[in-house]
Amino acid sequence: MPPGHQPGPYPPAGQPPQPWQPQPAPVAYALPPHPASGVPVPPAPPRSGGLLRRVLRFNTVLVVLLAVLIGMVAWQSVRIGELSTALRGADQRLSDLQKEDASRLDEADARLGALEKEVGGAFNVEKLAAAVLPSVFRVEAGPYTGTAFAVGPKAGDGGTNLFTNFHVVEALYKDGGRTVKITRDGQRFDAKIVAVNKLRDVAHLHTTAKFTGLTVTKTPAKPGQQIIAVGAPLGLTDTVTSGVISAIRETGYEEGPMVQFDAAINPGNSGGPVINGQQQVVGITVAGYLNAEGLGLAIPIADACKLFTIC
């Protein structure tokens, strides 16, 4: 049997074998031959259905994109509106808070001012003493000493008017003397006895030296008011004691009422000022009771100012 060939079917049993026959050759299925070189291949006919589908797809995508864009713009517009409303609300709240803060600050300033006024008006012995001591002097009238103080505006000649007690200068005055010595910070100045009132125990002095006169109260003294008494007891200048007005009394020994106070005084305080918390003179120290503490008397300053118009 030639190689590469398969044996045919076997004959049925009882039949003689058939002689070998060659198999038919396979048939090749081939494409038509290519056209000769140089001959163009005709283009395929256009497919109109595919182009239309592409256009429709593009338009659909475009519409979707436009819809998304419009939606985003609309959403942004809504958000911008919401934010604008929120900002306006925040601005209003901020404005309200600023107004509240301004109101609170004004209120705090008012309270602070009231507190400063209250503190400033508090009775401060140190502050009072510092303010009035430069206007208070030791008086030397012959062998006697006492206290005097500058009062009112400057005198017509530019000098200074002063008050003291008549009994401080009485001996000198009765002997015909009219000049006393006043001492301040170790310096001595001449002062003239201008006029006296024995009944009210007041004397008006004048010096050409220039000093600041103390102001006088325009309201009557009242019990309970805090005061300081300034003078030169026993010749000790710039002595300050404090207390309160105890009473307004008719003594029966002087013409008119007397201011009773409990600040300590001693011989030499006579003629010194009694000062209230507003740095104003309320009286002129005139006497203290012997063997008794806290019992001082002063002439109301209004009475002295009526007698001598220098206040």
Image (cartoon, rainbow, N blue to C red):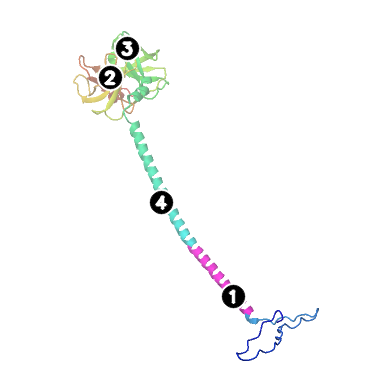
Find the distance from the CA under tag 3 to the CA under tag 4.
68 Å
Contact (CB < 8 A) between labels 3 and 1? no
Determine which quarter of the picture holds residue 299: top left
User: Looking at the picture, how far across and down is residue 120, in whole percent?
Assistant: 35, 31
Determine which quarter of the picture holds residue 4: bottom right
Find the distance from the CA under tag 2 to the CA under tag 1.
118 Å
Mark 2 — residue?
Answer: 285
Q: Earlier in the sequence, mark 3 or mark 4?
A: 4
Neighbor class of circle 3 (other Cα within 10 Å; few <14, some 14-19, many 20+) is: some
User: Looking at the picture, how far across and down is residue 153, in whole percent?
Assistant: 38, 25
Query: What residue lies at 57% left-to-right and 74% top-to-bottom?
Result: 60
Which amino acid, mark 1? Arg
Q: Is residue 93 left or right of residue 222?
A: right
Task: Give 191 or 276, whichever is nearer the viewer.
Answer: 276
Residue 311 can be seen in this image: no
Neighbor class of circle 1 (other Cα within 10 Å; few <14, some 14-19, many 20+) is: few
Which amino acid, mark 3? Gly
Neighbor class of circle 4 (other Cα within 10 Å; few <14, some 14-19, many 20+) is: few
* Helix, strand or loop: magenta stretch: helix
Task: Give 140 or 29, whichever is nearer the viewer.
Answer: 29
The disc at residue 235 is 3
Query: What residue lies at 45% left-to-right and 57% top-to-bottom?
Result: 86
Q: Quadrant of the C terminus?
A: top left
Mark 1 — residue?
Answer: 57
Q: Earlier in the sequence, mark 3 or mark 1?
A: 1
Q: Earlier in the sequence, mark 2 or mark 1?
A: 1
Check the image and report above or below for 224 versus 13: above
Q: Earlier in the sequence, mark 2 or mark 3?
A: 3
| Magenta-tinted stretch | 50-78
Q: Nearer the viewer, mark 3 or mark 1?
A: 1
